[in-house]
Amino acid sequence: MKAPHFPPAMHFFKAKPYIQKSPVFKLLQKMPKGAILHIHSSAQVSVDWLVMNVTYRPHCYVCFTRTGHVQFVFSARQPFQRLGCSPWNLLEKLRATMSDVPAFDKSLMRNLTLFTEDPDVTYPTQDEVWNRFEQIFTSISGLITYAPVFKDNLYQGFLQLYSDNIMYMELRTGLSQTYELDGTVHNRDWSIQTYKNLTEQFKLEHPDFIGMRIIVSVHRTQNLSTVKQAVKDTIEMQKRYPEVIAGFDLVGREDGGNSIWYYRDALSVPTQVKAKLSYFFHAGETDLFGTDVDRNVLDALLFNTTRIGHGFALAHHPLAKELSRKMGVPVEVCPISNQVLKLVSDLRNHPAAVLMAEGHPMVVSSDDPTLFGTAGLSYDFYEVFVGIGGLSASVGTLKELAMNSIRYSSLPPVLKENAMALWQQKWNKFIREFTINNKKKHLNDNFTLKKTLGPGKSLRLSQRRSLRSHSLECLKSVADLDGFPPRPVAPAKPQLPQHPVQHRQAAPPPQRRDSAVQEQRPDQAEDGEPHDCVQVVNAICSPR
Ligand SMILES: [Zn+2]
């Protein structure tokens, strides 16, 4: 069978060079994308920055575990050896002994990202990719919990988002303790205050960036009493920092952790103490069917979640799907994350395609850029637009998705209104520039073709198609998108009680859907080139 060349049908690690060459991708990079609503603090920057900037700082030590992983720590003196790890090596000295430093740095990068040239061989199962995924977070934590790096990591994260035309972020973070060289340890208040101060500083330097809020996250392998305490702590933190704390979430692999239902006593605390705490649950990041974890999407809704992280399983639960649509609860779609973590291989088969066709509210997000080799949102927007949206996706779809990111953010109403107004200005500018550039291209193409053909010659079909893609009618339709009416907003969200007191019967054994059968699609490549050039023509010129 001929290898596919349609980027969304390929693993992202192999598709990335094709995507980077794509005119659609270049357009998406320039597009004002609004907000990023699902991203984790430990994986928000590029791996190049972590290695080439952070590990080159003084006092950075590295050790190598028996399982072949790395751990880092910053220390003013030789740190105590950790169990299962080699003695600590000062990186500065270790590098000095290397004959090939670039190769050494590349090996460090490989330890901090999932990227590999042959992902299907390296990660044959979900268990293997998830084990590696969790391991990388342990490796990264020693770097980014060092207080000076903690600050710079956030600032660098802002810079990378800003350069991808993103104006606001909601960050999932466990608010881990941070440390100084002399052993001083900072608590959560220090971290929140630092987030606040750095956000203000970045906003001063970049007035069209509107800020960030935090979703406090706890790992779903923690026991019930720990999660209960974390919920109580988050309520208290929200009282003290209402402008920073957006809400609460459970993170980590759903299939390997406890279900939302398991934590029902902890998650009912806000109702019991008459406090308001918004939930932003990761739910339905699974392809198992019929397990408690698979039912997380329904339980998330019963606990009145504000958004659903991933919601990959939502399409298999008609009741939950209808409920979330009627309640206006969007799904945070993270296509590259779902593909790399082996829930779907061909993104045309992503369940979000069904949700999109049904007009279900959704936003596009990136989850863990460090681990997947992405930056900002352009790569995920590309996969959603070209792969999931298919030929029926248009610039109107992009506009709707960008607007959704502000509409479904946790910003208070007035700030949301201001953010939407600012985004609209950016969008207008984007459309204006896009129209002008394409008009120039149209004139150039016309001139070149006429010169090549000479008098009296007619255009071939492909040439006519090429011209049509830049025709004035087409450009006009793009320009008119300024006034394009977005899809109707989902109805106002009714409030559900936060006490889903129900009793369940024992769950039947899990059944994994047959992904091989599910994903058999004809190879659509004919010429060995990615097909998105055709896609963009259709996307831009198709009637709405
Ligand atoms: Zn996530």
Image: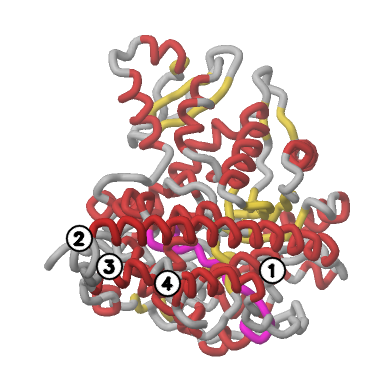
- Which amino acid, mark 3? Gln
The answer to which of marks 4 and 3 sits earlier in the sequence is 4
Distance between the alpha carbons at the discs numbered 4 and 3 = 28 Å
Q: Which residues are magenta?
A: 324-339
List the residue tagged with mark 1.
408
How crowded pointer 1 is (Cα within 10 Å; few <14, some 14-19, many 20+) is rated as: many
How crowded pointer 3 is (Cα within 10 Å; few <14, some 14-19, many 20+) is rated as: some
The answer to which of marks 1 and 2 sits earlier in the sequence is 1
Name which residue lies at 38% across and 79% down: 509
> Could you tell me which quadrant the N terminus lies in?
bottom left
Give the side of residue 515 with respect to residue 275, left or right. left
List the residue tagged with mark 2.
528
Q: Are marks 2 and 3 in contact (CB under 8 Å)?
A: no
Q: Which of 112 and 186 lies nearest the eye of the viewer?
A: 112
- Which amino acid, mark 2? Gly
Closer to the eye: label 2 or 3: 3
The answer to which of marks 3 and 1 sits earlier in the sequence is 1
Name which residue lies at 43% across and 11% down: 93
List the residue tagged with mark 4.
388
Q: Is residue 287 visible?
A: no
Distance between the alpha carbons at the discs numbered 3 and 1 = 43 Å
Q: Which of 190 and 526 lies nearest the eye of the viewer?
A: 526
Name which residue lies at 42% across and 66% down: 470
Residue 91: % across, % down: 45, 17
